């Protein structure tokens, strides 16, 4: 089954997101748990959550992805920033528990000059303080582009965090195609090779979701500038190959391209072979 969708606004509620997803041909989607640049979270309506769960079951949706706000940095040099990240992560996970088949994706953070080892240690300690074996939600570390002191641009960094987890079955990875390319993995030239390398270092069994984004910059640029599919350096052929790759079968493929809904509908159609 091909599960493909896009990032949607949660402003009108959960069931509204489900209806919007259906309107653009999606059978999965992603949403922010709260303001991506802030800290406030809109209270969830249990009936609204239940309506979305029923809609997803009726229409054969795959897993959906909740995205943490960008402001979280569990490996900051500032203890107050680390504490805010831990509290927000814990709160998000509590709020997501009623959601069926949902992943929680977040950017691991930036060590700010402390060094990669310190960054990995802070992230690991934060997750181990929060993640519980009884929770339903699986937390995903997103692959990063390597801007500044970002943690997670190399597969080995993600593996190191995962290896330190007390509850490893509740952790996974979301692979972002723009980020991976910008980090220096030549996805356009050799997508099979990049996935083979991911399998060698991290393990494809830990890959739970994919962000499908073209890149405005060449491989290794460390810029993180998303482009519409086929309008960047990765090219449409890369996404056609990834769509059909057996290693990604059944995973939610989420578009984060610079689009409005009509643009997302077109890209979803492209990936489904309808256009």
Image (tube, rainbow, N blue to C red):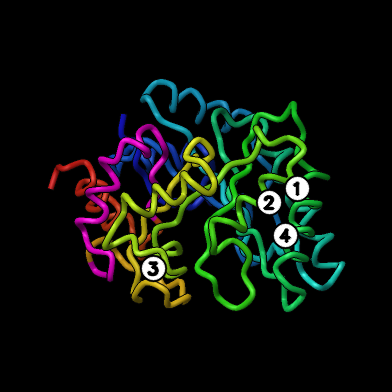
* Residue 127: numbered disc: 1
Q: Name the residue carrying label 4.
A: 120
Alpha carbons under labels 3 and 4: distance apart: 26 Å
What residue appears at the point 51 percent right and 47 percent down from the top-left corner?
Answer: 12
Secondary structure found at label 1: helix
* Residue 161: numbered disc: 2
Crowd class of label 4 (few under 14; some 14 to 19; many from 20; radius 10 Å): many
Secondary structure found at label 4: helix
Q: Is residue 212 above or below residue 118?
A: above
- Looking at marks 1 and 3 on the same chain, the residue that comes earlier in the sequence is marked by 1
Secondary structure found at label 2: helix
Query: Badges 1 and 4: C-beta atoms under 8 Å apart?
Result: no
Segment colored magenta: 231-255
Q: Name the residue carrying label 3.
A: 226
Q: Is residue 140 above or below residue 185?
A: above
Between residue 232 and residue 56, name the one nearer to us.
232
Alpha carbons under labels 2 and 1: distance apart: 9 Å
Image quadrant in which the N terminus is located: top left
In the rendered view, does 103 fall on the left or right side of 129? Answer: left
Alpha carbons under labels 3 and 2: distance apart: 26 Å
Task: Locate residue 50: give its quadrant.
Answer: top right
- Looking at marks 4 and 2 on the same chain, the residue that comes earlier in the sequence is marked by 4
Q: Nearer the viewer, mark 3 or mark 2?
A: 2
Secondary structure found at label 3: strand
Query: Badges 2 and 1: C-beta atoms under 8 Å apart?
Result: yes
- Looking at marks 1 and 4 on the same chain, the residue that comes earlier in the sequence is marked by 4
- Looking at marks 2 and 1 on the same chain, the residue that comes earlier in the sequence is marked by 1
Crowd class of label 2 (few under 14; some 14 to 19; many from 20; radius 10 Å): many
Residue 179 placed where, x, y %? Answer: 45, 64
Q: Is residue 49 above or below residue 159?
A: above
Q: Is residue 84 above or below residue 219?
A: above
Residue 123 magenta: no
């Amino acid at each position: 089954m091909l599960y493909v969708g896009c990032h949607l606004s949660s402003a009108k509620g959960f069931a509204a997101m489900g209806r919007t997803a259906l309107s653009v041909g999606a059978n999965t989607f992603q949403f922010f748990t709260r303001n991506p640049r802030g800290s406030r979270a809109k209270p969830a309506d249990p009936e609204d959550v239940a309506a979305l769960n029923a809609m997803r079951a009726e229409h054969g949706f795959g897993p959906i992805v909740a995205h943490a706000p960008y402001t979280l940095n569990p490996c900051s040099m500032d203890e107050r920033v680390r504490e805010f990240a831990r509290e927000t992560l814990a709160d998000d996970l509590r709020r997501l528990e009623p959601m069926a088949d949902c992943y929680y994706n977040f950017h691991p953070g930036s060590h700010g000059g402390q060094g990669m080892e310190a960054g990995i240690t802070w992230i690991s300690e934060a997750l181990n303080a929060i993640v519980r074996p009884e929770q339903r939600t699986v937390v995903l570390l997103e692959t990063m582009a390597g801007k500044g002191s970002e943690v997670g641009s190399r597969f080995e960094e993600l593996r190191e965090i995962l290896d330190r987890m007390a509850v490893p079955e509740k952790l996974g990875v979301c692979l972002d195609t723009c980020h991976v390319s910008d980090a220096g993995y030549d996805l356009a030239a050799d997508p099979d090779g990049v996935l083979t390398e991911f399998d060698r270092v991290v393990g494809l069994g830990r890959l739970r979701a994919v962000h499908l984004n073209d890149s405005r910059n060449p491989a290794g640029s460390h810029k993180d500038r998303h482009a519409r599919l086929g309008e960047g350096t990765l090219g449409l052929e890369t996404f056609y190959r990834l769509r059909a790759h057996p290693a990604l079968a059944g995973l939610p493929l989420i578009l984060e391209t610079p689009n409005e809904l009509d643009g997302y509908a077109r890209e979803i159609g492209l990936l489904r072979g309808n256009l």
